[in-house]
Amino acid sequence: MNQPARITVVGGGSWATAIIKILSEGNNHIRWWLRSQRDAGHIRKFHHNPSYLSDVQINPRKVRVCTKIKDALSTSDYIILAVPAAFVSDALQGVKPEQLAGKSIVSAIKGMIPEKNQLITDWAEQEFGVPSGRVAVIAGPCHAEEVALEKQSYLTIASQNLEFASEVAQFLNGRFVQTSALDDIYGVEYCAVMKNIIALACGITHGLGYGDNFQAVLVSNAMQEIRRFVDRVYPMQRDLSASAYLGDLLVTAYSPFSRNRTFGHLIGRGYSVQSAQMEMNMIAEGYYAVKSIHEINRHYGVLMPIMEMVYTVLYEKTSPVLATNALKTVLK
């Protein structure tokens, strides 16, 4: 890209802050929308987010902080959505399709619209009329906390339009982030949603005292579940051992930075869903996603015992001990 990319990041959490850091490394003009007036004011004055990744320095010459969504969107060509899926509609409340005319949408959300059971990219196309060729998703094993520490990381940008995916990959590429492009947007997005559910399962069983041997069997079986589901929902030739799929699953399933694993661990330890949410004070996307995947799978009937175990524990209040005992008998 010869001209600086004009980009808006929507969201004030850890992943949004990490994306701001990544973008600030390049030749980009950035607007950053945050809901919190307090956090926005703090960032303008002290150049760091007081609530998330507070060690990340925000470059005021490159980043303009906004609390009015229309101001944040007005001059940008690319809109990166980085809020929890359950709140993305609220974040863009009042935005009309014509205000996004000619703009591109990039989802950095690894979740689904609750109740609608809809992928973020499909929702963006339907709600705002953004052409499918100008919609992309950011995926890959990339924890915000490691981006803050400038640990070497990898991102995959997926879109039905491979040229557009490469365009987005270019402005996200940098010193400590390497990017690549892929055309399997649905496979990548569903995998990003489902790996959070698997991380919940890993956390639940770890909280119950299961060790590394069981976790390895759980994750390898989970990859088979993901394969069966995405091949049924959106069949195409894909390599699920690539980092956008398997890599993202592994880091979310095993890393202490994984909020979904942490949430699951609390459930396994005996916390209620509400208590676990209060303890974390962060959104675990897998909690909402497992209900969506469960309901979608009523139509497809794919065999997914791990997903069902998580669903029954979180939504039917089945004992984690009993649910895991039942799951043990079907894993191989």
Image (spheres, rainbow, N blue to C red):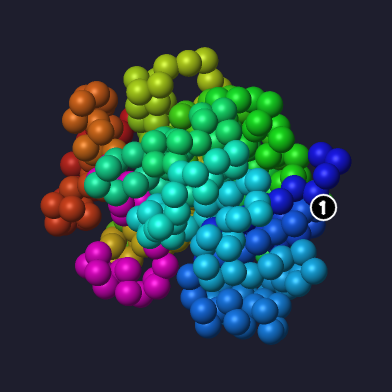
Q: Is residue 151 left or right of residue 16?
A: right
The answer to whether any part of residue 81 appears in the image is yes
* Residue 74 location (% of width, % of height): 60, 55
Q: Main secondary structure of the magenta part?
A: helix
Residue closest to the eye, 178 or 137: 137
- Which picture quadrant has residue 112? top left
* Residue at (32, 68) in percent of width and height: 277
* Residue 181 location (% of width, % of height): 66, 31
* Residue at (29, 41) in percent of width and height: 117
Mark 1: few/some/many CA within 10 Å (<14, 14-19, 20+): some
Q: Is residue 58 left or right of residue 241?
A: right
* Above or below, comparing residue 208 to residue 307 in the picture: below
* Residue at (59, 69) in percent of width and height: 66
**Image quarter in which the N terminus is found:** top right
**Image quarter in which the C terminus is found:** top left
The answer to whether any part of residue 191 appears in the image is no
- Which picture quadrant has residue 243? top right
Q: Is residue 86 left or right of residue 136?
A: left
Which segment did they paint magenta?
271-292
* Above or below, comparing residue 235 to residue 323 in the picture: above
- Which picture quadrant has residue 279? bottom left
- The residue indicated by pointer 1 is 27
* Residue 327 location (% of width, % of height): 24, 40
Q: Amino acid at mark 1?
A: Asn
Residue closest to the eye, 143 or 27: 27
Residue closest to the eye, 324 or 240: 240
296 drawn magenta: no
